[in-house]
Image (cartoon, coloured by chain):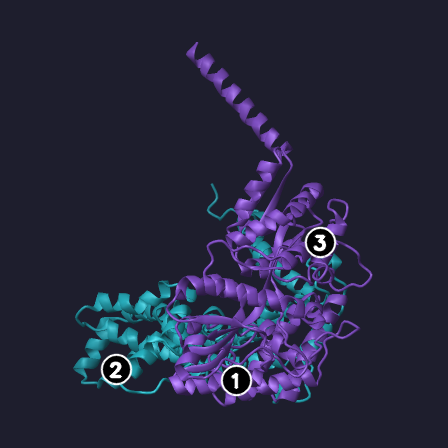
Amino acid sequence: MSGGTQRVPRWIPWAFLAPNLAIIALFSLAPVAINVLYSVTGSDNLYPSERPFVGLDNYRTLLDCESYLDPSSCSRDLFWRALGNALVFVPTQVLAMIGVALLTAVALNRDIRARGFFRGVFFFPVMLSPVVVAMTWVWLLQRDGAVNGILGSLGFLKVSWLADPTRAFRWSVFVTVWAHMGFYMVILLAGLQSIPADLYEAAKMDRASPWRVFTRITLPLLKPVLLVVFILATIRSVQTFDEIYILTGGGPGSATKMMVHYIYETGFAVQPRNYGLAAAASLLLGAVLLLFTALQMRLARGGRDA
Amino acid sequence: MNGIARAAARCAAFALAAAATTLAAAVPQITFEHFNPEGALVAAKFMRENPGTRVNFRQVSFQSLLESLPVQLASGQGPDVSMLADWGSLTKYYLDLRPYVDARYFEREFGAILPALRGNDPGSKAINGLLGTLTLNGAFVNVTLFQQAGIALPGPGATWDDWAEASRRVARATRTEMPMEMDRSGHRFASLAISYGAKLVGEDGSFVVDEGLKTAIRKFVAWHRDGTMPMDLWGAVGGATHRDNFADFMNGKVVFYFGGSWSLNNLDTEVGDLFEWAVVDAPCGTSSCALMPGGGAIAAFRHTREPALAGRFLAFLAREDNMREAIARRPAIPVSTRLLATGVELPGASEPMRAAIATFTRQVPKIPKEAYVFQGWRYQRAALNSMTTRISQVLTNELTVERAVAFMKKDVDLAIQASKR
């Protein structure tokens, strides 16, 4: 019997990978390929065989602008307004989401009374359907909603919470943070609990202030988890649709219109359906997401190298 | 022995089941979709009258008819017969019923709406379906508030401006929250636009931006700016989203509400005699007193495997006794020539409901041609969606009226261009 390892035939790893590769090809790569095909074909026909090739016309239509800083000068102004909204919404919402989730996780990691109950309370909105979340907030914020009802009973005037573009945008950020914060809180809580307790004990013996403990121990050791949360929250934020669609329908005007909403309306809500334009917009959105992800992976690698 | 008997019994049961399945498959059958549950009663009556046939009724939501049906039809699937939320854009899927129905009867009874079901194609003589009952946009007025304010209701021929002025005065006098509201719907806005002379659809089948459309938008925006209308509907929502605040009318919070006849049953049930309400004649503009028609046109589709049965079913729906029965069951506006001429009975309907149906029915002959042309236009949905989107953008100062109408034109032209490729 020889002591050397026996060589595994080269096809064996591929055989093990094949089921997963088939699933990825069927459910990820094929839809992307079909999307590319739709984006370079025209007409409102559904079957690709009935759709004539139009080259890059759909992309040209989307990108046709006199000035990219003035959406009104663009052929498809709503696409650019949605992109502009996303550029403000995504950083605001992600930072708010991570900030609140981190604060909540740190608070709920401490030895406080009814900790389990509060963890449940903060996680509860995650279990609700986005439509239920949005309908609840519509009910609270509409002209004759609960919030105005309470204000009225205290002698205040009614406020149009969703009719003012700035207020509606802020409420969109708030509602989406409220709905999803619990998910990220749980991930961060798990990260906090994985930090060795003896580090905190050593810091305590050195009489380090709570702020110093947080910035010198908690944050650095939580960095890998924070990066994961950052990537997940960013992708989710770019894809935001359900809550805002129900809450404001993308309004007032187009103040809260997001990219996915634009794609949905172009491809499915309007007759005749412009599948080609919607596909082109979704591929551009995919490209933006790829950029985000690449940037974050680079950051993550930087974090590990440090 | 027992085992053999059991096996034989199983074989017999299997054979019976197989035979039953084969027989069921042999029975000519069609699927019929509608959002009204009464569709089941109609299907049942048809099957009683036509033994050996089967109509499978499926109740679906209006949203499903609007968004899912076109995708189903595009993929060669979907029901054999269905109510249509969008008359003009699906014409290429409609089954021409001429071989299966009395075409002259359909022309005589539904002549006003048949061109719309042909997508306004002047060269077509196809019978693409029918419309048992019409729905109409309409103005609902809280008469009690007018009485409390001591202000007379503007009479027939009153303009939109007259109604706006009267509603403001009533709202002020009675401290009612809102003078006027209108569903957030391009279809409702089209009534206002056509009243002020908007053509909407040109001779060449393109979207028309004219002074009538601009005047209507300017008026509409001014009513939002001066508080005649709330920002909650058109101002607070974006995109093509449909919203209504009819609950405001039912709760006595608005003097004048521009919605549609489909709210009548709900209004009658919910409000009862809590306050006096009425449907009034179409408010007028400088051009006409227009109300947009609509409603559940019903068509059969080319992919059906039972075109004869589908045709027979539609002929059954178009029969006078069946249309009368449907209206008696659920009060609605008749559309067929004979029913309009002879009137309909509404047993069990309340007095306000009878008066409302009578008012709506009086408006039917006055519907301008432009309204029917727009309703049957293949690109109507694209125009409606663009109207709601762009007018809301004007209300929030994202666009000027000039820019908004330019975008409407661009939106619809793009839709036409995309579908013609």
In the depicted view, which residue is nearer to us: B246 or B278? B278
Residue wearing tag 2: A213
Chain A colour as displayed: cyan
Q: Which residue is drawn at 42% across and 74% down?
A: B248
Q: Is residue A22 above or below residue A183?
A: above
Looking at numbered disc 1 in the image, what kind of residue is underneath it? Ala
Determine crowd level at label 3: few under 14, some 14-19, many 20+ residues with C-alpha closer than 10 A. Answer: many
Q: Is residue A201 left or right of residue B196?
A: left
Circle 1: element type: helix
Circle 2: element type: helix
Label number found at residue B94: 3
Give the mark nearer the N terminus: 3 vs 1: 3
Q: Is residue A205 left or right of residue A128?
A: left
Q: What's the CA distance linking mark 3 and mark 2? A: 72 Å
Chain to which the residue tagged by mark 3 belongs? B
Residue wearing tag 1: B164
